[in-house]
Amino acid sequence: MSEENNREVNVADKVLIVLFSMVLVVTAGWQFYQLAEGDWGSDLEERIEGESLAAMHTKELVQSAKTSVGWRTDGVIVEGGVSYLVEDLQHGSSRGEYVNGENSAYEAIVDFRDQLAAKNINLVVMIVDGKGVANHMATEKLVAALGYEGVDVLHVCGEPVDQYLKHDSHWRPEMMERQAQKLAAMIEEKATGFMMGNGVYTERVLEVMNEGDLVRNGYLDQTKEEVSVRLVEKVKGSSDAARVLLLGDSYSNIFSAAEMGWGETAGLGERLSFQLQSECKVIAVNGNGAHASREKLIRNPELLDGKQVVVWQFAARELDRESWEKIVIPEMKGEVTHSNVAQLVYEKYEVLALPVWKKDSVYSTSLTEVLLKRKRDGQEVLVRMLLKENKQFTKVGALKKGELIQLKVSDSKAQKKYRRSELFSLDRYDLEVYWGELK
């Protein structure tokens, strides 16, 4: 074969090699895009790079997880034998703006503080960073702005990974206990006229073993983790009027909701009651605590009667919501008549609006709100329905906007047995909520 022909073959070979390499690169990129859930994984490192030097902890975690193929499409990162919730790391890498802009978290928090202050009630805000988040600048900016405005804030941040449950998205009991002690100290110092009790509550230690919410969906085959929780019990014969109300999420529920598997009567509310030796009432909603807990409050404003302090606890990742709506606390709760909506028979409704559901949610039970229009008279009705039970979607999960359904609507009290479940809300605070049952 001539030299000229050899050159032509070599050139052809090189072209084929280049094309083959490009195919490999594109294929690998697409696979990683899918693993990283696409919308934020591809540029995560670059966004962390520009965030702060302190955020290098999160960047190193992401780099290591990608190298070891620990990044999973089901909402979890596994690195070094520890499971991380992707939503937490997504928040830790974001450049969110929580202070400026319309419907910002800052505005909603200050407005809530002002409404409570008008009722002579102190507000303490508790923002909890998730596992793997290191010194998120946007959150720190919000905390500083709130402090300048005179809002009392406890920012739970900078905690090492071993202070969180190994394969769960929440804190260990020891970490929660330290925060309960800090909250009690803040309340005693800042709440005008607040007096701590004495001899109202006792405690006992219980060993609990569980897998964690990042394992139960089959992410890993790991041994269970054992922790010591401190159960709180009220002394028989003692009397104590609740002067503190805790609005919280799953961080408040983790050691008090039996279905979460980590014990009962040992959650943030109970531990705060013990530290204060004064009862703390709790409204806690998994998955949407920053907003659903306030929603429950405005539907039951009598819970503020006799309160001196409201503690508003929520996970820092909640700050990344697109809109933080202000709420209006009613002066008093009037009588609610259900006769014009609640029915004991199935009727036809049109689906007007549905919230966005997280398919990879780690919670076992989920509720969803659905905005409906009753066909016989055109009345708008807001209902809650069981979306997921035992990690399986019900037929509610197949609903579509514009669909006609047959539904039985009843009093919202029917949802009480799901009070510690995750809630996907439509944030329609102007409408009364009912319970809906599909035919």
Image (cartoon, helix red, strand yellow):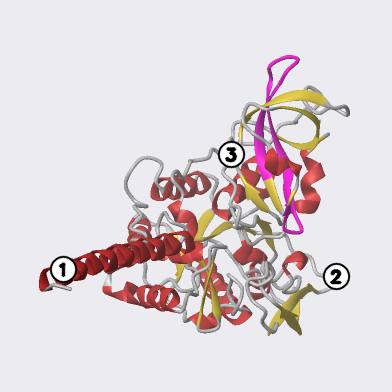
Q: Residue furthest front?
A: 1
Q: Residue at the spot x=83%, y=34% of the render?
A: 439
Say whether disc 2 or disc 1 marks the residue closer to the N-terminus.
Answer: 1
**Which stretch is magenta?**
368-392
Q: Is residue 379 magenta?
A: yes
Question: Label 3, label 1: how many angstroms apart (C-alpha)?
Answer: 70 Å
Relative to 124, residue 415 above or below: above
Instruction: Name the spot of residue 219 as percent of width and height, x first.
Output: 63, 71
Q: Residue at the spot x=42%, y=57% of the render?
A: 151
Question: Label 2, label 1: how many angstroms apart (C-alpha)?
Answer: 102 Å
Q: Amino acid at mark 1?
A: Asn
Mark 1 — residue? Answer: 5
Q: Residue at the spot x=70%, y=82% of the render?
A: 224
Say whether disc 3 or disc 2 marks the residue closer to the N-terminus.
Answer: 2
Q: Are marks 3 and 2 in contact (CB under 8 Å)?
A: no
Residue closer to the observer: 42 or 247 = 42
Q: Is residue 117 left or right of residue 261?
A: left
Question: What is the crowding at mark 2: few (fewer than 14 residues within 10 Å), some, or many (at least 20)?
Answer: few
Mark 3 — residue? Answer: 426
Mark 2 — residue? Answer: 237
Say whether disc 3 or disc 1 marks the residue closer to the N-terminus.
Answer: 1
Q: Are marks 2 and 1 in contact (CB under 8 Å)?
A: no
Main SS of the magenta segment? strand
Q: Is residue 28 left or right of residue 336?
A: left
The quarter holding residue 231 reads bottom right
